[in-house]
Image (cartoon, coloured by chain):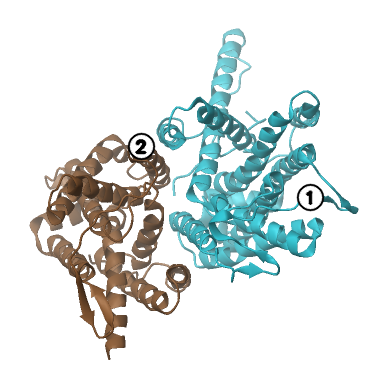
Chain colours: A cyan, B brown
């Protein structure tokens, strides 16, 4: 399945571009056909999908499972809120927030990656960072914790996050459907950008490191530099998602970076398929839709179901829906072809999902 | 003089909390190399079990022991149903136990509701100069040290401990020598869970029980065991000592949250300097 699994890091085929274009057209046309509530709930799926991509790229293509993406997401959201409220200019705030997300990733990434802690410790330390950051933000309810003119308000979060202004005309702001288009455009940019990144030298070296770190090092690559680069890049993407979340709900809160949101994006990625780029987006849409449906259906605690989903997928379908589906289709296709024309068929190409146990 | 006694007490108390939280994980993760992200929820389960037993008017100390037993049994069930399929697949273990942690939070919330429920133990206070020290906290310090010493002795000086350590080091060789490694893994996991549950029960009177209380403990436990390094029990003691001192002193001088953040910063810097942990250079030991 070359279309969804970009494993062979070649330039995307024309059919891929065509499918992306169709998806983009459908996405941009959607608000004309559905109500504002659907537009709102779809926008947030786009935001989560960007966050999930920032995690699943690191996980599936660099072999680094980071629970710290939600921390960078929170940093981005809070930075946007504080800077936009202080400066009154949201364009500067967006760039500053993404920059701060990268910087945060750079600092914690330096200590972890240059400390050469093992992959599993990396995962656990990023988890700890997320937990502590959330706790720290929750403790800022006192008036003393005011940055510029903006009190952080601890548990309650900042509830007057300004709307996004047009960069060329700060007097005009984007409304709900505007946020939808911005989120969709950002998601497309991140998706296509990451897909093209796979074809570059940088992206290929990262995959090489994922498959065999020692060998890449012996070939002369400074693996730490590449891994830190990927971590910083994904930190920026996560911060961008945080900014969009703040703009979407005019609200940022410590919940953005709690363990539940970290768990959610891992579930999105694992359900969709972590070693693909389309999978995490599909996973986000499916699970997000499912949880909001379960929430309204009132079947009790959503975490029970999410936990069960996570266990079942890890135990039974560790590669996720899209790659598994892809395998099934490929099998059927091969079976159909094999009956007709056995001689011409090349040997079954083994699709590697690129997943290595640490 | 009194001031330094109080600071010393604060440090000892913080160190004991670290030991209680991470001793079970030192066995489960430090020895068995099973990343159990549901560790915090095992603590939570211990605390809730203790709550139920004390509500049934059982003496608190007996209730704490029973809670440890309950969580130990629960651990064995988890090992049989989940963990044993995942030995050697460390990342998958991590994800599956995270799923388990969500599941447990959800189930406990469904049964007990999201609000806090406390366990009350009143042993009175001891006056030291102008300060007063809760006697329960002093008992807790003794309990943590005792539990650590007991585990260490069990592992280091008994036949059972030797067999378990041998199995963890080389399961094939142990099996060839007639050890039932499958049962050994199961019981070790159960023992680690029981210690965790006991720790949770002992912590319960200090904090309000909440279904989500595990999140912060799991973080603390993991940084302690990871920073401890290759010798799980010695390492956990040393790391608890370092982090407990940092936490105790800074919490005393500032707020608790600042103390907890400092612990994390110290842990990260420590891992940069000693990537294999405090006992990493020792090359073995318990």
Same chain for labels 1 and 2? Say yes or no. no
| Residue that numbered label 2 is attached to | B107
Asked if residue A107 can be seen in this view, the reply is: yes
Is B137 in front, or is B232?
Answer: B137
Report helix, strand or loop for mark 1.
Answer: loop
Single out the residue that lies furthest toward the left: B159
Asked if residue B189 can be seen in this view, the reply is: no
Compared to residue A236, the image places residue B284 above or below, namely below
Compared to residue A50, the image places residue A168 above or below, namely below
The residue lying at 26 percent from left, 66 percent from top is B284
Asked if residue B120 lies left or right of residue B38, the reply is left
| Residue that numbered label 1 is attached to | A164
Asked if residue A147 lies left or right of residue A298, the reply is right
Residue A342: x and y in percent read: 58, 13
- Disc 1 residue crowd, few under 14, some 14–19, many 20+, Cα 10 Å: many
- Disc 2 residue crowd, few under 14, some 14–19, many 20+, Cα 10 Å: some
Tag 1 near tag 2, CB within 8 Å: no
Is B264 in front, or is B212?
Answer: B212
Quarter of the image where one finds residue A149? bottom right
Compared to residue B46, the image places residue A138 above or below, namely below
Is B169 in front, or is B87?
Answer: B87
Quarter of the image where one finds residue B145? bottom left
The N terminus of chain A, quarter of image: top right
Residue A81: x and y in percent read: 69, 57
**Marking on residue B116:** none
């Amino acid at each position: 399945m070359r279309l969804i699994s970009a494993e062979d890091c070649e330039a995307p085929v024309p059919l891929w571009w065509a499918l992306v274009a169709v998806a983009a057209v459908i996405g941009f046309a959607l608000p004309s056909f559905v109500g504002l509530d659907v537009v709102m709930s779809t926008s947030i799926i786009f935001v989560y999908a960007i966050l999930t991509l920032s995690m699943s790229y690191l996980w599936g293509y660099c072999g680094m499972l980071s629970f710290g993406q939600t921390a960078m997401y929170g940093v981005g959201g809070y930075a946007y809120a504080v800077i936009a409220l202080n400066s009154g200019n949201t364009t500067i705030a967006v760039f500053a927030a993404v920059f701060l997300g990268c910087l945060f990733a750079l600092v914690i990434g330096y200590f972890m990656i240059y400390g050469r802690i093992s992959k599993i410790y990396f995962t656990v330390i990023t988890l700890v960072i997320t937990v502590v950051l959330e706790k720290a933000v929750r403790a800022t309810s006192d008036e003393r914790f005011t940055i510029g003119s903006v009190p952080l308000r601890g548990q309650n979060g900042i509830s007057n996050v300004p709307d996004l202004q047009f960069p060329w005309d700060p007097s005009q702001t984007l409304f709900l459907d505007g946020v939808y288009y911005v989120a969709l455009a950002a998601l497309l940019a991140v998706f296509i950008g990451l897909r093209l990144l796979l074809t570059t030298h940088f992206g290929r070296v990262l995959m090489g490191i994922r498959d065999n770190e020692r060998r890449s090092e012996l070939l002369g690559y400074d693996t730490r530099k590449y891994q830190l680069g990927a971590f910083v890049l994904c930190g920026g993407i996560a911060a961008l998602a945080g900014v969009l979340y703040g703009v979407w709900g005019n609200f940022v809160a410590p919940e953005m970076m709690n363990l539940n949101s970290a768990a959610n994006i891992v579930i999105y990625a694992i359900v969709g398929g972590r070693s693909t780029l389309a999978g995490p987006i599909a996973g986000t849409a499916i699970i997000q839709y499912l949880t909001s449906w379960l929430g309204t259906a009132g079947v009790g605690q959503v975490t029970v179901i999410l936990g069960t989903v996570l266990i079942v997928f890890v135990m039974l379908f560790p590669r996720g829906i899209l790659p598994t589906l892809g395998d099934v289709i490929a099998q059927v296709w091969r079976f159909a072809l094999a009956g007709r024309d056995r001689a011409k068929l090349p040997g079954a190409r083994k699709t590697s999902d690129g997943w290595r146990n640490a | 003089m009194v001031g330094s006694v109080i600071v010393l007490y604060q440090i000892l108390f913080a160190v004991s909390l670290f030991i209680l939280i991470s001793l079970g994980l030192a066995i489960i993760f430090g020895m068995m190399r099973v990343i159990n992200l549901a560790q915090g929820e095992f603590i939570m389960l211990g605390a809730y079990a203790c709550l139920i037993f004390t509500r049934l008017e059982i003496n608190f100390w007996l209730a704490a022991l029973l809670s440890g037993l309950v969580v130990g049994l629960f651990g064995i069930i988890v090992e049989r149903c989940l963990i044993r399929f995942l030995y050697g697949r460390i990342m998958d273990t991590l994800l599956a136990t995270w799923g388990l942690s969500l599941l447990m939070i959800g189930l406990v919330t469904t049964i007990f509701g999201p609000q806090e429920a406390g366990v009350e133990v009143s042993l009175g206070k001891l006056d030291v100069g102008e300060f007063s020290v809760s006697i329960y906290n002093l008992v807790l310090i003794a309990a943590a040290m005792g539990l650590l010493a007991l585990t260490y002795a069990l592992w280091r000086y008994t036949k059972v401990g030797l067999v378990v350590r041998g199995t963890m080091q080389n399961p094939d060789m142990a099996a060839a020598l007639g050890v039932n490694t499958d049962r050994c893994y199961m019981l070790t996991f159960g023992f680690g869970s029981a210690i965790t549950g006991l720790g949770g029960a002992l912590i319960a009177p200090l904090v309000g029980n909440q279904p989500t209380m595990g999140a912060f403990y799991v973080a603390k436990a993991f940084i302690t065991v990871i920073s401890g390094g290759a010798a799980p029990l010695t390492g956990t003691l040393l790391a608890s000592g370092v982090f407990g001192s940092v936490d105790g002193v800074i919490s005393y001088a500032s707020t608790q949250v600042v103390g907890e953040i400092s612990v994390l910063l110290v842990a990260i810097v420590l891992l940069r300097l000693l990537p294999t942990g405090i006992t990493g250079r020792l090359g073995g030991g318990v």
